[in-house]
Image (cartoon, helix red, strand yellow):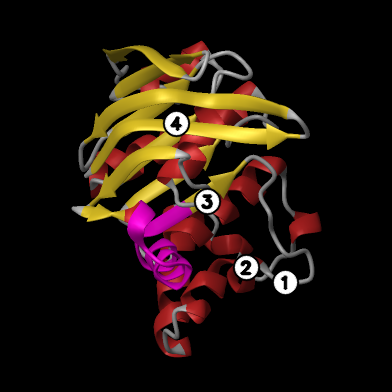
């Protein structure tokens, strides 16, 4: 599904050039749950942002579903993100004035989906993430884990081909983190959702199919993960 070839990313900070990525190469198949791990400053979030079309490589190429995405116009990239990609971030990024359901349907509204369709789909997804009973609540009435599940439901409303998650458990305790990771694994195993997640927690590996370990802007190694059968205890 994704092929990355010799990708570099250089940021200009005043007179200093910072090389965040140094010739990254990798492949990610459809239906994988892939983790990107490494120490702070290793380039993992930069790589995720480039894969998710939130940033552009300085050199190299990224192919998603056979499309060389770096060659797309800004309008085409925006359309590609809206129709094929979903995003979950560590700060939830909910609109506090809106209800749970109103937050979830925003991407579907942007696509021009009919209200009947997106309301029905949002109820289905909110039940799927265990928030069917919280549909009319607002952000201040939700725990951190519930807010993150709202963010996940919002990312799924357009049925994206790929779900990107940038340290989605960073603000959560270990028990709530397991709830979120079990949800990701269920989405991956039951529905074949492709998930790419940045994390710095080694124990998250047990939920993933494969991990790319980064250091100094490069993929140092990768390994297949042996997922445990039950992580809910």
| Camera sees residue 233 | no
Label 3, label 1: how far apart the Cα atoms are: 25 Å
Q: Nearer the viewer, mark 3 or mark 1?
A: 3
Residue 98, which numbered label?
1
Seen in the picture, residue 127 relative to 102 is either above or below; the reply is above
Q: Pointer 4: what residue?
A: 8
Nearest the camera: 185 or 13? 13
SS of the residue under disc 4: strand
Q: Which marked residue is nearer to the observer: mark 3 or mark 4?
A: 4
Q: Secondary structure at mark 1?
A: loop
Question: Which label lies toward us, 3 or 2?
Answer: 3
Q: Pointer 3: residues within 10 angstroms few (<14), some, or many (20+)? A: few
* Residue positioned 22% across, 41% down in the render: 31
List the residue tagged with mark 2: 103
Q: Earlier in the sequence, mark 3 or mark 2?
A: 3
Is there any visible trace of residue 133 in the rendered image?
Answer: yes
């Amino acid at each position: 599904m994704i092929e990355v070839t010799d990708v570099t990313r250089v940021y200009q900070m005043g007179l200093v050039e910072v090389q965040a990525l140094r010739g990254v190469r990798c492949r990610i198949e459809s239906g994988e749950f892939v983790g990107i791990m490494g120490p702070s400053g290793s380039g993992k979030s930069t790589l995720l942002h480039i894969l998710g079309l939130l940033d552009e490589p300085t050199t190299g190429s990224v192919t998603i579903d056979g499309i060389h995405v770096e060659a797309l116009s800004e309008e085409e990239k925006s359309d590609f993100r809206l129709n094929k990609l979903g995003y979950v971030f560590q700060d939830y990024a909910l609109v506090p004035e809106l209800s749970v359901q109103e937050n979830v349907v925003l991407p579907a509204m942007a696509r021009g989906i009919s209200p009947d369709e997106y309301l029905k789909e949002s109820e289905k997804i909110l039940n799927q993430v265990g928030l069917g009973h919280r549909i009319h609540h607002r952000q201040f009435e939700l725990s951190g884990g519930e807010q993150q599940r709202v963010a996940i439901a919002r990312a799924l409303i357009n049925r994206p081909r790929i779900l990107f998650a940038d340290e989605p458990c960073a603000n959560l305790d270990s028990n709530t983190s397991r709830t979120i990771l079990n949800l990701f694994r269920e989405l991956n195993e039951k529905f074949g959702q492709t998930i790419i997640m940045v994390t710095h927690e080694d124990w998250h590996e047990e939920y993933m199919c494969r991990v790319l370990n980064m250091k100094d802007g490069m993929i140092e190694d990768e390994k297949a993960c042996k997922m445990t059968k039950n992580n809910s205890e």
